[in-house]
Amino acid sequence: MIIVGAKMKTLFIALGISINIFGQNSSKSFEIKGVVKPSVTKADSIYLEPAFIDTSFYENKSFISKIENNNFTFTGKISYPIGLFLSFQNSNGGYAMTQMILVDKGNHTLSIDEFIPNKYYNLSNSEINTELNKKFLPQYYKILQDEELAVEDKNIVQEKDYKKIRREFNEKKIQYLLDYTKKYPNSYISLWFAIERYSVIGYNDKFLDIYNYLSPKIKKTSTAKVFIKKLNEKNFEDKITKISLKDYNDVKKNGYNLDTKYTLVDFWFSNCGPCLIEMPKYKELYSKYKRRSFEIIGISTDRTSNKGNWRKVIKEKELIWRQYLDENGTEAKKYNINKFPTTFLLDSEGKIIKKDISPEELEQFLEENLKN
C-alpha cells in the first residue's frame, strides 16, 4: 500500500506530475450536433428523452435543445451508452417521436432529412451505432417488416386475430434479442432493446434470460440493476399466487386465492426480531379491516429444523390470519427475497401496489381505500 503524504505530494507538484488521489469520474461527455429540415419540424425546440420508458432506468433523464437555422445541439454526461428518443412537434403541429437512439460518449452528428416512424436514426462516430447498423438491425428490421405485412393482410377482419399476430411477433423480437445477447453479452444494445420491449409489452420470462446472459460489466450499471429489480418484482407478481407452500399442518399447497380487495403478503421467519416487532400492529390492522375486505398472508422461510418454532410463534403470538411455510426459503430465493420482513401489498388481481409498506403506511392506505 502506498500512502501519498503532504511532503510526497509537494514533491510531485514540484516535478510537474499530477496525481488524482480520488480516482476519475466515470461519466463521459457527449455532444450531438444535428440538422433537421424545415419539412420535418418548424418548432423552436427538440427533445432527447425517455418517452414511454420509466425514468428510473436513467441517470440523466432528458435533454433539450433550441433549433436555430435548422441546427440543434445536445450536450451532457453519461456513464455508459443509453437509449433515448428524439421528439418534436412535426410540421403539421402534431407530436413526432423517433425510434430509440443509442447515445454514446464522444462527438456525433445526426441528420434528419425526413421523419420515418419505424426508422432507427444513427449517430456518427459511435461504436454502438456502428454495431447497431451492421450486426443488430438487419435481422430486426426484417422482423418489423414481416410484422407490418402480416397486420396489413386484408384477410384480417377480427381484432383478436390482429392481437394474436402482434403477440407472435413480439415473441419473435424477444427471441431475437435473447439470441443476440447470447452472442454479444457485452452489448448495451441488448440491454436497452430489452427495456424498450419490456416497456411496451410488459413482463416476459425471456427478459430474465436476457438479463442473465448480459456480461458482469453491464449488470453492474444502475440501469441493469433497476431492470432486474423490476423483472423480479413482476415475475413475483405474475406467480405470487401460484408458489408452492405448506400450511400449518404440513399439507402442500400449490398457491392460494386472493379473496379480498387488498392483501398483504408478509415474508418472515420465526427468529426474525424486526418481523416479530411488526406483528402486534398487523393484528390490530387485521382486526380493524378484515370485514372491509382486507387479508394478510404470512409466508415463513423457516428451515426444516425450525418448523416447530414457527408453529410455536404462530400459536403464542395468536397470528390468526393465513400462515404458510416456504420451507428453507426455496420460493423466496427464486425472487431475490433475502431481507426480512419483506411485504407486498396486492390488489384483488395480484398486482403489486407497494413493496415493503410500513404498518403506518398500510393503515393510512386502508383507511383511505376501505371506507365503511
Image: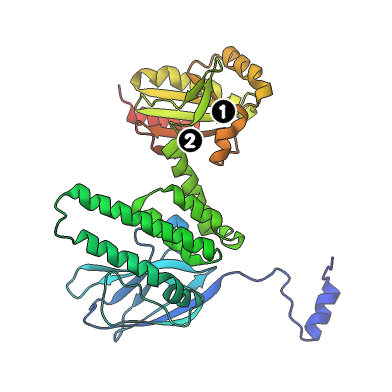
Secondary structure found at label 2: loop
Kind of residue sitting beneath label 2: Ile
Above-or-below relation of 18 to 103: below
Report how far apart the C-alphas of labels 2 and 1 lie in the structure: 21 Å
Residue 149 visible in the picture: yes
Residue positioned 18% across, 71% down in the render: 93
Residue 300 sits in quarter:
top right
Secondary structure found at label 1: loop
Kind of residue sitting beneath label 1: Asp
Of residue 87 and residue 182, the one placed in the foreground of this image is 182
Quarter of the figure that contains the C terminus: top left
Could you tell me residue 5's position as x and y percent?
83, 70
Which residue has dot 1 on it? 326
Could you tell me residue 239's position as x and y percent?
44, 36
Could you tell me residue 90's position as x and y percent?
22, 73
Quarter of the figure that contains the N terminus: bottom right
Residue positioned 26% across, 83% down in the render: 37
Estimate how packed mark 2 is, as few (under 14), some (14 to 19) or many (20 or more) residues with alpha carbons within 10 Å: some
Which residue has dot 2 on it? 357
Estimate how packed mark 1 is, as few (under 14), some (14 to 19) or many (20 or more) residues with alpha carbons within 10 Å: many
